[in-house]
Amino acid sequence: MAAASSNFKHPYNEPHQRMLILSCRGGGGHQAAEAAISSIFESAFEIQKMYPMQEMRLCRRPFIEECYNYLLQKGCIRTASLVVRLTAPIFSQFSDKCSPLKQRLESRLDEFKPDIIVSVAPLINAEAIRVASIRNIPYLLVTTDHHVGNWFPGGRKVADGEYRRLIVTVGADLPTSKGLLRQQGIKEESIEVTGFPVRKEFLEEKPGRIELCARLKIPYDKKIILIMMGGAGSPKSVAYAQKLLQSRLSHKIHVVVICGTDKESLSALQQVPSPLLTPLGFVKNVSDYMSVANLLITKPGPGTVAEAEHLGVPMIIDHIADPVFWEKPIPDYVENQKLGTVVWNEDEIVETAAQLIRRKKHAPTVKNPSTFDKRIVTLVEKLLTGSAL
């Protein structure tokens, strides 16, 4: 199975340049982007990572990220959106002299002395850019949502002309991405449409289907339906799996469910006595399962959608409940790009799956090979050499 390669020559001669990556542990998308960027630059930079939102603690625990992940796991989407909307203004005060976030970032900059800052973290960027600008450190913001309202919350703008060693990347040119950035004071020439990061393992060449299915201990001669509802998981994965296994499709499919950190759903699926089901918790080889999948059922997460798009896997996007507001553009994006179908009711899942598994995957090459890795190297070089000024 052929795949796009990320093996390319870095334009850097010095192996001791330093990169500080700002990330977060709320949801799996930011961590996937962090991993993708780390793998691209690990041979050319000394890399340190910082998780600014973990500085917001309650009883010594990072309550924002933990609360967000818990709400997603329980399917409390509206509450998760509300939590983010309420906490976002807190981060708009990041530049306050008493801000522990600002102090921690300045302390890390003093200690590590990075040549460049790369952020895949929402909420903190308007103020973090101000800190970087004072020290004249290049700042690359890699957004991982098609709605960038969380990346500059509270109406805080990057003042026009304030800092020119700045580039912001978006997945696509949409009113909710590039359009919102312009409203936040980001100059047109500082915005780059790059697509979203795709993890290194999705870019690597894979064995053929028979060999890979044998490794994964799933049948190669069945239509593989992969269900993934984000890193935090969701009880919906159990409902979807049960409907498929009890349907007229059961004789021709094998269902793989990756539950992530959702132990309750994993336990429920492990009680289903079916040889047509493979329930899994958190796995590191998602790319292997997606490479053999004939269909992906997932929530509207931009990272997962980008990786499925790269591999040419048809998708069913769950839209039974309103997604968090920053994922709302995804269903339209999937349908407009003809990547799959959106379902609005659980009863639609079987018929929609029946239609999509008739499609042939875009083998032997990927449908929309990601070029993010090569683009991002060019942008980092541009920032470091000063050609972005």
Image: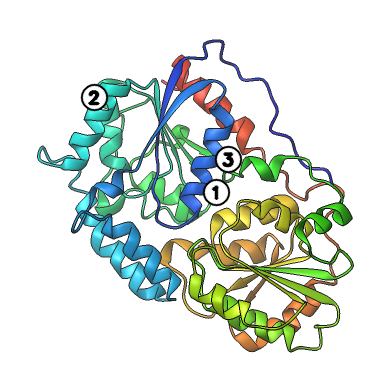
Labels 1 and 3: the sequence-earlier one: 1
List x then y, in percent, for residue 146. 50, 55
Labels 2 and 1: the sequence-earlier one: 2
| Mark 3 neighbour class, 10 Å CA radius: few under 14, some 14 to 19, many 20 or more | many
Q: Is residue 5 above or below residue 365?
A: above
Mark count: 3
List x then y, in percent, for residue 88. 26, 56
Q: Which residue is mark 3?
A: 194
Q: What's the amino acid at mark 3? A: Thr
The answer to whether residue 162 is visible is no
List x then y, in percent, for residue 270. 62, 77
Could you say whether the residue bearing mark 1 is in a helix, strand or loop? loop
**For the residues bearing labels 2 and 3, Cβ distance under 8 angstroms:** no
Q: Which residue is mark 1?
A: 173
Q: Which residue is mark 2?
A: 134
| Mark 1 neighbour class, 10 Å CA radius: few under 14, some 14 to 19, many 20 or more | some
- Residue drawn at 29 percent across, 63 percent down: 85
Question: In the image, is 15 to the left or to the right of 88?
Answer: right
